Amino acid sequence: MRKISIFILCFFVIAFSPAISFSDTTSDINSLLERECINLKKEKLSNLILTGFSSDLQKGLDPDLLKIMEGVIKRTDFDGISEEKTFEIIKLVYGAYKKGASLEYLDLIFDVAYSKDISVEQLFAAANALKEFYNSDVPQDIYEEFVYHAIEEKWDPSVMPTLTRGLIYGVDRGLTAQKVALAIIIDVDQNGLKKKSADELVLDAIKFVRENEPEKWKPMKNVERELMMKLAKKRELEKLRQDAETKKNQKELERQSAEEDLKKKFEEDTIRLSEDEKKVAMDMADAEKRNYEEIMKYELEQEKMRKMEEEEKLKFEQERQRLIRLQQEAERKKLTEDALKYQREQEEIKEKTEEENRRLRAERDRIDKEVEATKRKNLEKVKKYQEEQENIKDKLEKEKMVFAKEKEKIAREIEKMVKAYQDEISKYQKEESEVDKVVKEQAKEMERDKERKNREREEKRRKELAAMEQKVSEYGKRGNLDMDKLFSTIDKHIGIPYQFGGDSENGIDCSAFTRRVYREQGIELPRTSQQQSMIGGGVGGNPLQPGDLVFFNTSIMGGISHVGVYMDNNTFAHASSSQGVTKSNLRERYFSKRYVRANRIMGE
């Protein structure tokens, strides 16, 4: 009874544990939606997520997926995006993240999917390009426009790393970033990638810009040049090694093919010889069968003759008994005539019996002769079969010897060639190892130089931001904003569509919009919303004034990711990812929920 109870308990644990796990997952997702959704319909989005991610969620809720859901829903709920589009973007971002893209850079770019048809591969390539560009000297407005254009024109994601590094290389060599970027964009848009490789396209673009501004070109440092030469040598050695490997593998395949051909031929000969052997065996079996049938026929004839003899003897005995009775009767009756008749009949029967015996002996002699002749014939066939078997065995042995000799010959030749290729490969590997060692040393030196540059770049950015903050602070103390110009500038931009990295009337993003508004006031703000949040003084609990920058958290990674300009009566203007430059009410729940802080640039 105790064993049955344990079994039932185990059954229920196994049967219902996945359901409990999935129930917990559903609860976590619904809790997230309940917390973050204001504009979005929670039940509809929940159904889309649970259905669309059913296979992933059966294994348990990935914390990274939950984080991506939260970040995307924050943004799409804030921007008024539909439930279907929100679900598509969650899948898109999660797919690019699983391929290896950084969440930090996916966070910057994924809202282009609001209005653009973008694949996981394109988003992955765009996020990686942003990451590379950030650690370079390419200006942010240039590389953001470059990445956005790649998405808009649906460039092949596989060439993005080459084009990205090409632009960075051109800038590192002193060329104007805008010109190099424009040269690459024009060449790609004119179907350049169908006529030449991405490497060729980048080199042509750099060559074109270099010819137009030769004075700016900075040649490579010696260490960079040596590294390039070593890398080229390494690629050459790698190619030679691969060629040698290919030749070696080809010879191995040729040897295998030759062995297979010999084996096939040997098997065909074996099958043919086996068929001959089988044919002889079948002929022998037929002969044995015929012999057996003749013997059986002879035995039947003998049996028939024995039966006939026995019948004749029986008849003779019956007749003799009858005649004896007649004789006895005749003796009794003294009938001489019957006795004489009996004697005559006896003689006739005797003669008839002797005649029949002679005939049977003659027939038996004839059958014996025929059987003897058949046996001699069968013995000859057996002897012939044995001779043929010997010939087949001899032929098979010869075929085996030929096959073994040919196989050994091919093996020796292949072994000799393989050894030569292995020596060649060892040579290339040794050279490659030496080159690789030098490359690693120089790469470390380059990496140290890169880290130094990154530190200098970050320090430069901090100094620029500090200088900008100081300038804004000094400018702000001199007076208040020109309100007429503030409102007219905002009204002039209303309706301009949103574009990631855009800063023109064709497309603009949130921080570029606030920069334009303050540029009209004679103040230059930093490029990003996060940097702009460091400029000016915090408003705190004081009432907002027209011109105050209002900041929002709509990101996967957390922190400030959106900025607008306060106008009046709780109204603020901003470049919405879904609507472009528009006016919104700060008290609307899905804006107030994401609101972080406000900064005052000018005035008390």
Image (cartoon, rainbow, N blue to C red):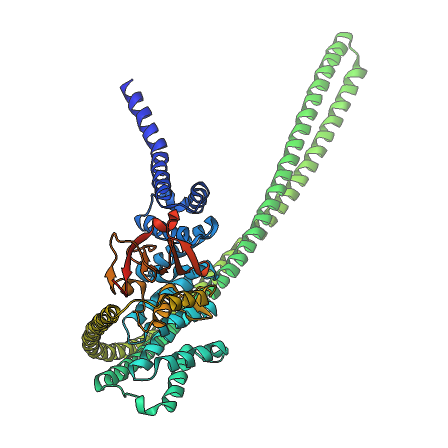
**In front of the other: 30 or 475:** 475
The residue shown at (64%, 42%) is 367
Q: Furthest residue to the top?
A: 332
The image quadrant that residue 50 belongs to is top left
User: What x and y, as percent, mark residue 450?
Assistant: 22, 75
In which quadrant is the N terminus drawn? top left
Please, is residue 380 above or below residue 27 in the view? Answer: below
- How many tags in the picture? 0
Q: Is residue 110 above or below residue 66?
A: below
- Residue at 32% across / 52% down in the picture? 595
- Between 580 and 61, which is closer to the camera in this rendering? 580
- Report whether 181 appears left or right of 2: right
Quarter of the picture containing the C terminus is bottom left
Residue 265 in sight: yes
How far from the left and from the top, in percent, is residue 579?
A: 46, 59
Residue appearing at x 44%, y 77% in the figure: 185
Location of residue 128 in the rendering, given as x and y in whole percent from the top left corner: 34, 66
- Which residue lies most toward the right here? 337
Q: Nearer the viewer, residue 291 or 551?
A: 551
459 on left or right of 239: left
| Residue 406 visible to the viewer | no
Percent from the top left, x then y, of residue 444? 19, 75
Left or right placement of residue 201 versus residue 532 in this view: right
Where, by quadrant of the figure, is residue 465 drawn? Answer: bottom left
The residue sitting at 31% across, 76% down in the picture is 138
